[in-house]
Amino acid sequence: MQRLTILTILLLTTFWLPAQQLSLFTQYRENSTIINPAAIESDFLAFGQNITFGASYRAQWVGLDNAPSTQTVRGSYLYADGEGVALMGGGYIMNDQTGPTGFTGFYGRIGGLLTQDPEVGGLAIGLSAGAVNFRVNASDIRLRETNDIVGTIDRSQFFADIGAGIYFYHLMGRSDNYFYAGVSVPQVTGLDLTFQDENGDYTIKKIQHYYGMLGTYFFFDNDSFLEPSLWVKYVSGAPLNADFNLRYYLPGNFWIGAGGASSGNVHLETGVLLGDTAGFDNSFKIGYGFDYSFSSFGPSAGSTHEINLAFSLFR
């Protein structure tokens, strides 16, 4: 399901290749509200902080020409007092570039949490909506057999995009451990983008992606915790992809993690949380993720690097 380096060429020819079209994340738990608009931030489940601002940068398959890169900025809020229906909100900006094609999207997010106590659990329903600018640098695309360029004029097109999701979390029994699970369709409508050129029309088809995510938090007496998690991705016509990760927070607010995906990727991650050990309600988190691909491309597909920054607080 990984985006192929030659995906942009294949999508602009006369046949269709089902593949991962939306952005991928190594530290997907840090970007859960982008993946699922109904998701509860990991900072709330782990540390009780209901406001989070974050940013990430991902360079995929470093060393390959036209390799994908993704940048995001996000913010989220959960009204964590009372019972009944708690308000959730936020938004994000995402920029993604793969060779001569790319998109920049601006999204708002809103949802409701049905709960008797947000610290115990609840069922959330969320929606995201935004505007996306999809661009094609046609003059940079050459057909493999003839070496002809697809077009001489670069094109861009705006379109509306919406996403939907459901998310459930709850304490397990009488413990302080959480279980969470969610399903989402971050691109509900799908889209056919047709760009006209003096050499003819070419079309890029955007299709729905179906995501599932689940995990648990196991807290220990020394203020550490263990979080196994699973992210399942499905796109019509492509194999089901499952991404499993295990993350352990040490008592000194340092974490390490590892995992793998059925697509042939191996993940490693580490990070540090600043501020919490000094008794502050606010905290600053720095995380680094590393991927190595053993997919059908072989080891030459290269490595992936991802940086996540997050500032969280309770209000």
Image (cartoon, rainbow, N blue to C red):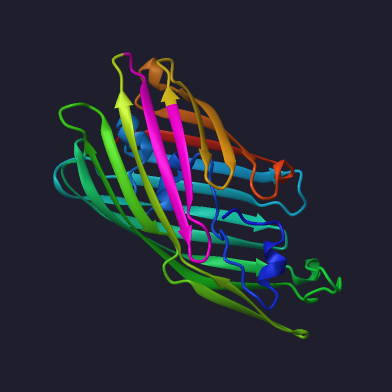
Name the one closer to the observer, 53 or 297. Answer: 297
Give residue 176's position: percent from left, percent from top. Answer: 23, 27
Give residue 270's position: percent from left, percent from top. Answer: 53, 27
If the image is split into quadrants, where does the C terminus sit? top left
Can residue 164 be seen in this snapshot?
yes
Can residue 91 be seen in this snapshot?
no
Name the one closer to the observer, 161 or 281. Answer: 161
Q: Residue at x 31, y 57 (%)?
A: 126
Name the one closer to the observer, 216 or 134. Answer: 216
Q: Residue at x 65, y 46 (%)?
A: 60
Give residue 234's position: percent from left, percent from top. Answer: 46, 58
Asked if residue 42 lies left or right of residue 154, the reply is left
Q: Is residue 229 magenta?
A: yes
Q: Residue at x 69, y 68 (%)?
A: 10
Q: Main secondary structure of the magenta part?
A: strand
Asked if residue 24 lies left or right of residue 43, the reply is right
Asked if residue 25 lies left or right of residue 100, the reply is left
Count of labels in the image: 0
Give residue 260's position: percent from left, percent from top. Answer: 53, 38
The furthest residue to the right? 147
Bounds of the magenta segment: 222-247
Name the one closer to the observer, 164 or 6. Answer: 6
If the image is split into quadrants, where does the N terminus sit? bottom right
Q: Residue at x 54, y 30 (%)?
A: 269
Q: Is residue 74 magenta?
A: no
